[in-house]
Amino acid sequence: MEKIIALAFTAFIAENIILSQFLGICPFLGVSKKRSNALGMGFAVLFVMLISSMVTWVLYKYVLEVLEIEYMRTIVFIIVIASLVQMVETFIKKVSPPLYKALGIYLPLITTNCAVLGVAILNISKGHSFVEMVVYTTFIGLGFIFVMYIFSMIREKLDNAPVPKAFQGIPIALIVAAILAIIFSRFGGIF
Amino acid sequence: MNSGLKSGLVLLVLGIVCGTLLALVNSFTAPVIAEIEEAAQYDALKEFYYDIEDPNYENFVITSDYDIDKLEINEDGVEGIFVIKDKGSDIIDSLGYLVYANGYSGDAPVLMLIIVEEDMDVIGYKVVSHKETTGFGADIVDNDFNVSSLIDLSGFDGVAGTTLTSNAILECFNIVAGRAGDDFGGGLDD
Amino acid sequence: MTNKENLLKGLVKENPLFVSVLGMCPSLAVSTSLENALGMGMGVLFVLVMSNLIISLIMSNEKLAALVKPVRIPVYIVVIATLVTIVEMVMHAFLISLYNSLGVFIPLIVVNCIILGRAEAFASSNKPLDSVLDGIGMALGFTAAIAIIAIFREFLGKGTITVWGNLVINLKGAFTFIGIEPIGMFVQPAGAFLSFGLILAAVVAIGNKRKEKLAKGAAK
């Protein structure tokens, strides 16, 4: 149990996917100008990440490893993610139109979001068991949402701040991210 | 022909072509990769036994002062054991354990070489390979884990911020502590 | 466009990292040393040139293009993923230390927006030769950009510049001269964001100056 808690904490803060692993930077900078968008994107990523990690984990352990074709990993994973995103989109559209309205526009962007493929691969290369994989992925996803939310609040305020011309937009956002990264890295030593 | 079927066929053909290509490249690189991994294990051992000269990785290494055998074990986290004997003697001088914790061989977060003597004194240990995120990697490899004997591991010192890898390394020491006594007592004879 | 323009536009005018701000994840992650940046650049160069070539060969053949068109994105992805896997296997076998330090970012070249972006925006509608030149230019522009960030970070963070393997330029003297230690934060994750932000602001400032100059010139 202690191990699982340590894993969850590490995934959530110390190895935060955005601020220490540099995955999912594109949505982090692109869709974080408003709180509502940041949350929408965050939940869409968590959802797709969790499903695709489960599917790819099972495929890797029970198909690729059994057939000894581990080198097909990247191809198989990216195809799985691309088709899952398609299916999730169609499914949500049919079952829950309000949810589709909230998440729909973010879904196509997720295929090329390196966070999803990255976490699927990390779950394999870190040798996680199924339970560890689910915990790790969930908390990585929650960490993503958490940072997106904090960051979007700061950026909303930043709109009214007197930022030098050359720093407007992405440069100042990166410098804010640097400050957040310093704060997050300090939590690393707790566990 | 139905257009959906056609598209499916295009993807299938492409998939087969790509798969074959990768299998071909893999057949060239896989042996090289296996050799590198084995070489890394011997390199780790070299740090503690300086007189190992250019070991021929396929055969056992015979150096001026020691006879070294590598036993492939692959059970309970132990991938292999280097059995190090004084030249010409049957008495085991020390055992070098290649040990991993959590996960599968090759996928595990860390592979350690731990060399112990019969009285459970640790001669040396080295992180052979690890999966720690860039930035923490060097900290793990260079860290002094403060272990000098397997009898008491309470002084173990991990690296802050790498809880999981540090735990795995402690587990490696525990695995070795759990079996070294038996191995020295003749457990390796069969 | 001439061949020369195709090749050179990726370096400055349409630089994928500094102008289009694509491919951020790997450039933040692997810019801890110049060696890593160059290694990443080599990987991207190979994948981008080959994928541009293969895709433009497929799409410039009318029969093949008609077959592929409805499923072109999946086709691109499979082609790119195959090339990336080849890079991964070759690096693992022959450049083990680079393979270890780039880690998960080698397979992640697959989702590097630059590569899929060039396939869709350029290679699918241009001749093979043009596509190859475009790929070389874009990859070199990307490499140059991460190399700049890497030199900045490694120099400030460690006082050294690791060009390749054992070829390390030691500039610690500069720090001793002003009496401080290298600032370790720059090689940590926070330093990646900070360095990229500062360099990007500098690039924007230079661009703005030039635009002003041009505008003034036009007004006269």
Image: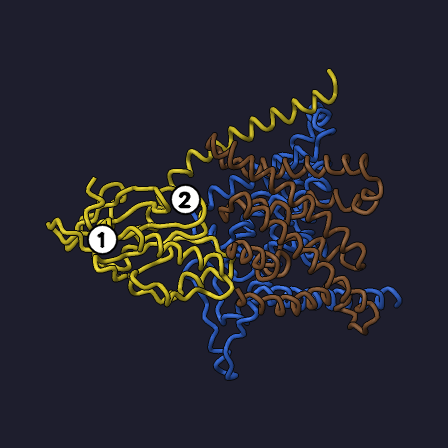
Chain colours: A brown, B yellow, C blue
Picture residue at 48% right of the left edge, 69% below the top:
C160
Is the residue C197 above or below the residue B1 in the image?
below
User: Which mark's residue is nearer the viewer, 1 or 2?
Assistant: 2
Residue B53: which numbered mark, if any?
Answer: 1
Q: Which residue lies furthest to the left in this view?
A: B88
Mark 1 burial class by Cα count in 10 Å: few <14, some 14-19, many 20+: few
Q: What element carries label 2?
A: loop
Task: Name the spot of residue A150 as percent of width and height, x first.
Answer: 73, 63
Q: Is residue B6 left or right of residue C109?
A: right
Inspect the image, locate mark 2, and give the three-letter code of the amino acid beneath it. Ser
Split into 4 quadrants, where in the image is the N terminus of chain C? top right
Task: Name the spot of residue B14 as percent of width and height, x first.
Answer: 60, 27
Q: Mark 1 lies on which chain?
A: B
Q: In this view, does B33 lie to the left or right of C6?
A: left
Q: In this view, does C105 lie to the left or right of A48?
A: left
Split into 4 quadrants, where in the image is the C terminus of chain C? bottom right
Is the residue B179 above or below the residue C60 in the image?
below
Task: Name the spot of residue C39 as percent of width and height, x first.
Answer: 51, 53
Q: What element carries label 1?
A: loop
Residue B105: which numbered mark, if any?
Answer: 2
Picture residue at 13% right of the left edge, 52% below the top:
B87
Rendered image quadrant of residue A73: top right
Is the residue C67 above or below the residue B168 in the image?
above
A44 or B119, which is in the foreground? B119
Q: Residue furthest front?
A: A1
Inspect the image, locate mark 1, and give the three-letter code of the amino acid beneath it. Glu
Picture residue at 44% right of the left edge, 58% below the top:
B167
Is the residue B10 above or below the residue A167 in the image?
above
